[in-house]
Amino acid sequence: MLHYTILLGQTFYHHFFQYTMKGILFTLVFLTFSSLTLKAAHIVGGDFNVSWVEGNTFETQLKLFRDCFGGGADFDASITVTIFDSNTDTIFGSFDMSNPQITGITLGDECYTPTSLCVEQGVYITTIDLPNNPGGYYLSWERCCRNNIISNLADPGEEGMVFTCSIADPALHNSSPVFDAYPSTGYFCIGIENTLNFNVTDADGDSLVYFFDNPLSGDATNSSSPTSAVAGPRPYTSCVWGAGYGLDNILNTTIPMTIDQVSGTITVTPEQLGVYVFAVYVAELRNGAVIGAVRREIQFQTVVCTVDLPATFVSPTDTLFEIIAENFLEIPIIVEDPNATDPLFVVAESELFTPHAGYPAVFEGGVGTGTANSMFSWQTSCVNISDSYHKVSLKAFSDGCSGSDTTFFTFYVKVNPDLDGWIEGAPNVITPNNDGVNEYFGLNVSINPCYDTFRVLIYDRWGLLVFESEDPFFKWHGTDQNSGKDVPDGTYFYILDASFKEVPYRKTSSLTVFR
C-alpha cells in the first residue's frame, strides 16, 4: 500500500484537459477481442462506500463490475465483509451482504454503442452499526480471480482482488466519498488522448485528493476457492506488474497515464491493444487531516477508434480588436474541418447584432463543406465609443451527433475615439516673437467629431493658471489671460480634459515658451 500521508502536504496543481471529439464512429477490432472476451467473464472492478444514516448506523454499499461475456463467474449470492480496527489492524467483526442489485451498463454514447464489450454492475447494500473509535475502521472483502488476459500484470490469473475502504470515527457521523456509476465510455481509444473522471462526490463537503494505487492481491487466489472466509488485514500485497508496466506508467505508453490530484481527471493516450487494470485511491481530508479513504479498482480494454475530428477556426486568430469610431471594421471568419466532406455551419451571438442607435454590426452566417467562410462587419460611429469590450461568440458545427461536433471561438471589439489626433498636433515649444513662426500653442489638427466636452488649462511652474479655454480651436500666444501681458520664458504645463460619449480623456504634458 502506498504511504499517502507524505504526499498530502504537497501543493496540488489543477491540470485541465479538454478533448473534443465529434460525430464519433468507433470501429472496434472484433476479431482480436472476440477471442479475448470469451475468456473474460470475471469481476473486473469495484469499490466500497459507507453513508451515515443516524446515530452509529451506516449504510454500506459495495459496487462490483463484471465482464458479462462468456457466461463465466457470476456475482456471488452472498459475501462476508470483514471490519478491521484502523488503530491495530485487528478484526473487529464481520457482516454479510447478499442479493446484489444487478443492472447492465450501457457503453458508448449517442454516436456509437459497442457490441464487443459488455459490463454488468452488481450492488450489495446493507446497514451496520459501529461504536465510536477515534482511529476509525476499514472494511475489506477479497475475491478471486482476475482475467488471464490482463496485459499489465505478470500473472493475472494467479492474482486475487481486495476491495476496501477506510471509515472515519463514527462519532463524526461522516459519509465516505462516493464513486459515480461505471463510466459509459468504459474503454480507451488507441492513438488519441482519452480523458476519464469517475466523478467522486462527498456529502460532507470534505476535500478530496486523488492518487493512482497498485492493484491489490489477497489470499483468495485459487479459482477453486474464489472468496476468503475472512479477508486479511493491511498492508495488502500489490499485484506484480508485467515487464514495462508499473504505477508510474500503467499502460506502458510514451506519455504515462496521469491523474490530477485535485479534480481526479485521468488522461492517457494508449498505444496498443490490450486489457489494463488500474486503481484510483481517494483520500478524504477535513481540516488538513485524512479521516477516510475509498478506492476503485477497474479494468479497461483499449480499442481502435476512427475519430471524426472537430472543426477549427483558422480566422480570426486574435481575440481582441480595437477600432477608431467612424471607421468600418471587417473580420473574416474561416472554419476548416479535417474531414473534407463534412457539412459545416457557423453562427454568432452578440449584443452588437441587436438594432440600436448608430450602426449595428452584421454577421453573415457561414455554410460550407469542409470549409466555411463568413464575415463580421461593423460600421462604427461616435455613439459606439465605450470603455467596454463587446463580446462576439462564434460556434461552428457539422451534422454530427450528441453535440460533440461543436467548436467555439470568442473575440472582443472595443470602439475608441481618435485620441492620437488631439495630441500629436500640439507643439512642445512656441516662440511668440512676431516672426510668424511658432507664434502660438494649439492643437492644429482636425477636431475629433466624437467629442462632447473640451477644456485646456495652462499653468506656470508655480502652479498659477495663466490660460483656460473650452474651445478646441484655441490659440495661446504666451500671454497671461488675466493681465494680458506676455508670460516669462520658461516651462509651462498644460492639461487637456475631454469626454467622448461620456468616456473621459485627460492628457498632461509641458511646453516651453522661448522668445
Image (cartoon, rainbow, N blue to C red):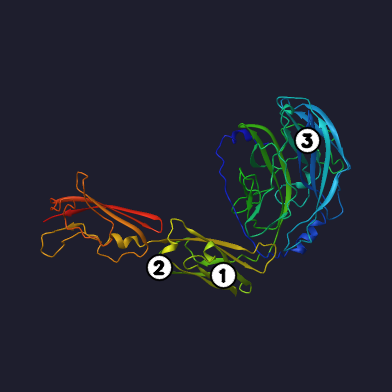
Q: Amino acid at mark 1?
A: Glu
* Residue on which disc 3 sits: 140
**Residue beneath the point at 64% across and 61% down:** 21
Out of 425 and 128, give the one closest to the viewer: 425
Q: Residues within 10 Å of mark 3 (few under 14, many from 20)?
A: many
Pinpoint residue 110: horizontal percent, then vertical percent: 73, 62
Residue 407: image quadrant is bottom right
Q: Residues within 10 Å of mark 2 (few under 14, many from 20)?
A: many
Q: In x, y percent, where is residue 132? A: 75, 25
Q: Nearer the viewer, residue 90 or 432?
A: 432
In this view, 85 is above or below 215: above
Q: Residue at x 20, y 58 (%)?
A: 476
| Residue 1, x across and y down, in percent | 68, 36
Disc 1 crowd rating (10 Å Cα; few below 14, some 14-19, many 20+) is many
Q: Earlier in the sequence, mark 2 or mark 1?
A: 2
The amino acid at mark 2 is Glu
Is disc 2 in contact with disc 1, using a CB cutoff of under 8 Å? Answer: no
Q: Which mark is residue 180?
A: none
The mark closer to the camera, 3 or 2, is: 2
User: In the structure shown, which secondary structural element does the residue marked by tag 2 occupy?
Assistant: loop
What's the mark number on residue 326? 2
Which residue in the protein does label 1 denote? 336
